[in-house]
């Protein structure tokens, strides 16, 4: 029986994908895997039994990826599972800003007790007239599942779409580009052309405060910035100054903090991007499937700290799953311990610091041999499936 511990409330649709041989446990002790959404795991001590953590969502800022990798714990996320929910909310934020809908609704709330409000509306509504998004230009920074889908939606609504990616430009050019989108090498090439700028990238040391005074100064006057990615992408001091000077017309964010929530010109949404029932179901479903596939077969899909590797379902023979430091020569040392003739099939993948191996073996190895493998310098975790 495998034990799964949930740090947050996880959709039953996703949990229903767990086999009967898996059980949910209230305590983290002796858990084989953890499902998490927003709980902060940076100060959490994991028991040795944990082999995987799955984030039911895309962002993984709440998980210490490198530390877990060094412990031989694979961390998964679920890219694309909530993309439609986020794209729809970005579109809603853009329309709220374009048509001054929130400000108009606040005016109604403030004047709802006026018995002549239906007449007063006709005089007041001109201040909330707004603009259309048809023929406007949007620049999308980040063309992952969300950014690419957003570009399709905006194009279908008659907008001009520019996009840039954090991937190598030539590498991304080989992918299927969204229709009617102009791919640019970097955001500086379209900042002065855009009525809207949408941030759709993860928060990393390289992307922190990617929207700052220097970047804002290159933007078109009256631009609207849409941040449905992460709070730290935008410098609070600089966005406040830009709003006060009207360089930025509005800042629409799904990640408000104390400062931005109190700024004039900010439309603050309470982190609703991936909170639809459908998105939560999709994320939990994907996370559960990935955990089971790793525990049962050693396959790694959508990991954020280990390379992708897939050797299909475990055959009737025995299988080894090994996580290791990518700098070591794993094959030779494994052959020395279990014998080259005992290896039926072997896949190895490495990415930057860490590697993963799936080895199908003809005859079951002994506990002593498994211990020897785990004692190889650079092996992070080896387990017999």
Image (cartoon, rainbow, N blue to C red):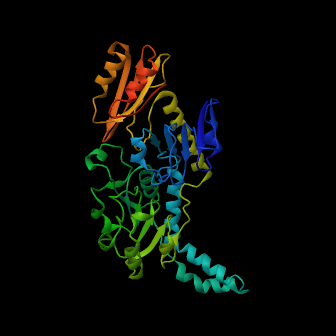
Q: In this view, does 24 lie to the left or right of 247?
A: right
x, y (%) of residue 75? 46, 43
- Residue 274 in view in this figure: yes
Q: Is residue 154 left or right of residue 126?
A: left
> 259 or 372: which is nearer to us?
372
x, y (%) of residue 312? 45, 25
Kindly identify the residue that appears in the image at 43 percent across and 44 percent down: 68
Image label count: 0
Kindly identify the residue that appears in the image at 40 percent across and 42 percent down: 69
Please tell me whether residue 249 is drawn above or below residue 194 in the rendered image: below
Please tell me whether residue 384 is drawn above or below residue 204 in the rendered image: above
> 117 or 6: which is nearer to us?
6
Kindly identify the residue that appears in the image at 41 percent across and 64 percent down: 232
x, y (%) of residue 213? 32, 73
Looking at the figure, which quarter contains the N terminus? top right
Please tell me whether residue 183 is drawn above or below residue 314 in the rendered image: below
- Residue 222 in view in this figure: no
């Amino acid at each position: 029986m495998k034990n799964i511990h949930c740090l947050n409330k996880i959709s039953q649709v996703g949990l229903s994908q767990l086999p009967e041989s898996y059980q949910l446990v209230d305590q983290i002790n002796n858990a084989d895997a953890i499902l998490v959404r927003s709980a902060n795991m940076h100060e959490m001590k994991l028991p040795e039994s944990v082999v995987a953590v799955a984030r039911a969502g895309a962002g993984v800022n709440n998980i210490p990826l490198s530390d877990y990798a060094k412990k031989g714990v694979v961390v998964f996320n679920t890219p694309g599972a909530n993309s439609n929910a986020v794209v729809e909310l970005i579109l809603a934020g853009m329309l709220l800003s374009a048509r001054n809908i929130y400000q108009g609704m606040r005016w109604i709330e403030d004047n709802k007790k006026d018995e002549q409000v239906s007449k007063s509306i006709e005089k007041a509504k001109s201040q909330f007239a707004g603009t259309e998004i048809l023929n406007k230009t949007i620049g999308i920074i980040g063309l992952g599942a969300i950014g690419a889908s957003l570009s399709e939606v905006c194009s279908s609504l008659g907008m001009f779409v520019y996009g840039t990616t954090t991937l190598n430009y030539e590498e991304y050019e080989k992918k299927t580009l969204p229709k009617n989108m102009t791919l640019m090498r970097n955001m500086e090439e379209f900042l002065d052309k855009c009525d809207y700028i949408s941030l759709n990238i993860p928060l990393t040391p390289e992307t922190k405060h990617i929207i700052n005074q220097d970047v804002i100064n290159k933007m078109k006057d009256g631009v609207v910035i849409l941040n449905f990615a992460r709070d730290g992408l935008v410098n609070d001091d600089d966005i406040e100054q830009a709003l006060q000077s009207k360089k930025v017309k509005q800042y629409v964010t799904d990640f408000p903090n104390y400062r931005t929530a109190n700024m004039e010109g900010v439309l603050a949404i309470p982190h609703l991007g991936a909170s639809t029932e459908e998105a939560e179901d999709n994320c939990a479903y994907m996370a559960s499937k990935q955990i089971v596939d790793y525990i049962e077969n050693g396959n790694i899909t959508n990991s954020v700290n280990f390379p992708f590797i897939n050797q299909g379902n475990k055959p009737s023979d025995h299988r080894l799953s090994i996580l290791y430091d990518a700098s070591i020569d794993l094959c030779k040392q494994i052959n020395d311990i279990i014998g080259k003739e005992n290896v039926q099939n072997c896949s190895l993948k490495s990415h930057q610091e860490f590697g993963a191996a799936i080895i199908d073996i003809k005859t079951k190895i002994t506990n002593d041999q498994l211990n020897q493998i785990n004692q190889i310098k650079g092996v992070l975790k080896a387990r017999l499936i």
